[in-house]
Amino acid sequence: MKRKALFSFCLMVLLLSSCGRDDSGQLLGVPDRPTWNGINPFGMVYVPSGTLTIGQSDQDVFQTYIQRQKTVSISGFFMDDTEITNNEYRQYVYWVRDSLAHLIMDDIYEDEYGNERIDWEYELDYSSEELDDMYYQGDMKINDFERALDTRQLQYTYKWIDWQKAAHNPDIVRSNLLKEETVSVYPDTLVWIRDFAYSYNEPFTRNYFWHPAFDDYPVVGVNWKQAKAFSHWRTHIWNSFKGDQPNTEEFRLPTETEWEWAARGGREIAPYPWGGYYIRNAKGCLLANFKPGRGNYPEDGGFYTVKADAYFPNDYGLYNMSGNVSEWTETQYHPNAYSHVHDLNPDVKYDAKDDDPEAYKRKVIRGGSWKDISYYCQTGTRNWEYQDTSKSYIGFRCALTFLGRSINDF
């Protein structure tokens, strides 16, 4: 009797354990997995995996012992074909503005998991008196008829995981790995005045970000933290509307070596993205927006910035990897970084705190700008700026890690 009961129990366990599995007895993997056909983000180009020699391609007059050459390998990624423009960044500003307005109007609902969500179906009326607190009031107004948005209220809060801390503290609880940042959204338009002593640039302060004449020009006055927050927001809206596709990697700033690999466009030792050793073509035309000679700004076709897709792209289809605006990268600036970084996707990260020494807050910028001499337009030239500093000549573009060996696999 005991033997029969034991047999019945074993048979039941066997039947239960076979439920939901393949009956063939073969190793076939988990069924009904989501399909993945790759992605093609709008406004981005694919930069393939490859190997490059980072460092100066021409004589490094200023920093001979800082930018020593090193061979590294970079995995494939997507990159914006232009710098982020004023109008693209304005979409982010409007989203934060509308979020604040919906919260004031209490346009909130509770989702199936008990989380409070903004109901975007409600139409906003910005002339409503209920939204007056979003605008300058009293002695902050120029006149009684002005209705100007108080941009100081536009703040974006987000969280992220400190993966470096997680990798070196395997027993740490997840809550101790989460970090939170609240960042001002609106660009610092006063950079046009502050960056140039005894210079009349007030029209750019008033118009550069808002006037439609500059919609397709690169956004400036955005510091490193603001560029990071924009990338997080871009990931959020991507995940909200991409449908049934599995979650992808996050939009982010490119690393310093990714930026250099993309800027070279597959040309190994060429100092400029177009491949030549000179900043002019055979007809004598300048090939980027920078400061020619000793200050002949308009000679290259631009006086300040130019449209983000001006001039010819490099062989990867990327515009203005030299000149126009310098670009933030993810990487912390270390003078002799090339001597100790790994040769596989090299990067130096440090999350500088507000009370850290100033030297810890330096982030790598690349590409040179409209106000720089041609040396800073070379693909191998390194430069830096403090992460909490905004300038009229620094912008950014985003990157997105490619999931797979090559885009040709799909």
Image (spheres, helix red, strand yellow):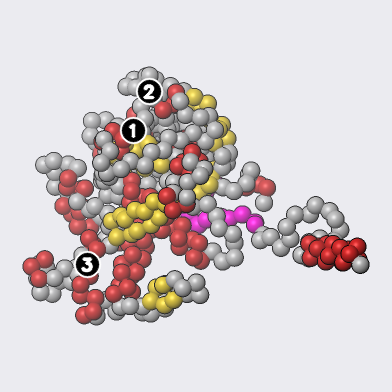
In space, the residues marked 3 and 2 are separated at their CA atoms by: 46 Å
Depth order, front residue of 56/324: 56
For badge 2, the amino acid type reads Ile
Q: Which residues are magenta?
A: 36-46
Q: Is residue 218 left or right of residue 255?
A: left
Q: Which residue is mark 1?
A: 383
Instruction: Identify the secondary structure beneath mark 3.
Output: loop
Does residue 147 appear in the picture of this structure?
A: yes
Q: Is residue 210 left or right of residue 331?
A: left
Main secondary-structure element of the magenta-colored stretch: loop
For badge 3, the amino acid type reads Leu
> Which disc, if any, is residue 392?
none
Residue 212: give x, y in percent of width and height: 30, 61
> Which disc, if any, is residue 66?
2
Name the image quarter holding the N terminus: bottom right
Residue 106: give x, y in percent of width and height: 33, 78
Q: Which residue is mark 3?
A: 149
Mark sitting earlier along the chain (3/2)? 2
In space, the residues marked 2 and 1 are separated at their CA atoms by: 11 Å
In space, the residues marked 1 and 3 are separated at their CA atoms by: 35 Å
Q: Residue at x 56, y 66 (%)?
A: 243
Q: Tell me if label 3 and label 2 are in contact, CB under 8 Å.
A: no
Vertical side of 235 occupied by 258: above or below: above
Residue 239: give x, y in percent of width and height: 50, 62
Depth order, front residue of 107/258: 107
Instruction: Identify the secondary structure beneath mark 1.
Output: strand
